[in-house]
Image (cartoon, helix red, strand yellow):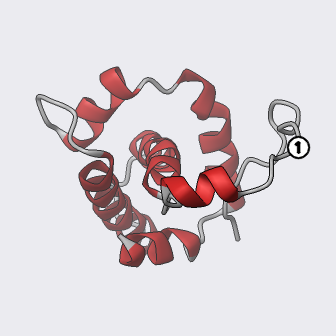
């Protein structure tokens, strides 16, 4: 999983694509959208879904950069939207004993603050 995490951490896309994806996050529903994006009957594990989404997004980015007439902006934004919820579910989690020993965290920032999206 670290290879995909590294790839996503280094993901650089045009600012307009990132802004469009950010706005679409509120309407994203995994059960509805994920099956359509990766063309599967049942939703796969988060790791498998992220790999498939990232591969599809990478192919779409190559088409965009080549200026191919087959490029679909809507699909590209949809794939970016699908990557971010998957990314959050695939990050490394500490062991239960580390969680119990860790100091209590402060309150979460207000809604919309701290959303991680890479852009160039």
Q: Which residue is at a point 30% across and 55% down the rendered structure image? A: 47
Q: Quadrant of residue 102?
A: bottom right
Q: Which residue is at a point 28% across and 49% down the rendered structure image? A: 49
Q: Which residue is at a point 61% across and 53% down the rendered structure image? A: 99
Mark 1 neighbour density, 10 Å: few (under 14) some (14–19) many (20 or more): few
Expressed as whole percent of the image width and height from the top left, the position of residue 32 reads 32, 21
Name the residue that disc number 1 marks.
106
Indicate whether 27 appears above or below 3: above
Expressed as whole percent of the image width and height from the top left, the position of residue 63 reads 35, 66
Expressed as whole percent of the image width and height from the top left, the position of residue 44 reads 20, 41
Q: Nearer the viewer, residue 101 or 77?
A: 101
Viewport quadrant of the N terminus: bottom left
In the rendered structure, the answer to whether residue 44 lies left or right of residue 103 reads: left
Q: Nearer the viewer, residue 103 or 23?
A: 103
How many marks the image carries: the answer is 1
| Circle 1: element type | loop
Expressed as whole percent of the image width and height from the top left, the position of residue 96 reads 50, 53
Q: Which residue is at a point 46% across and 75% down the rendered structure image? A: 7
Q: Nearer the viewer, residue 49 or 78?
A: 49
In the rendered structure, the answer to whether residue 80 lies left or right of residue 20 reads: left
In the rendered structure, the answer to whether residue 25 lies left or right of residue 68 reads: right
């Amino acid at each position: 999983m670290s290879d995909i995490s590294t790839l996503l951490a280094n993901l650089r896309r045009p600012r307009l694509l990132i802004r469009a994806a950010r706005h679409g996050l509120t309407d994203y529903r995994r059960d509805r959208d994920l099956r359509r994006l990766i063309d599967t009957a049942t939703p796969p594990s988060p790791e498998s879904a992220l790999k498939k989404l990232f591969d599809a997004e990478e192919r779409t980015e190559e088409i965009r950069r080549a200026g191919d007439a087959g490029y679909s902006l809507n699909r590209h934004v949809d794939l970016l939207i699908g990557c971010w919820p998957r990314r959050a579910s695939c990050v490394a989690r500490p062991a239960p004993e580390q969680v119990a020993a860790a100091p209590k965290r402060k309150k979460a920032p207000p809604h919309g603050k701290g959303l991680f999206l890479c852009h160039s």
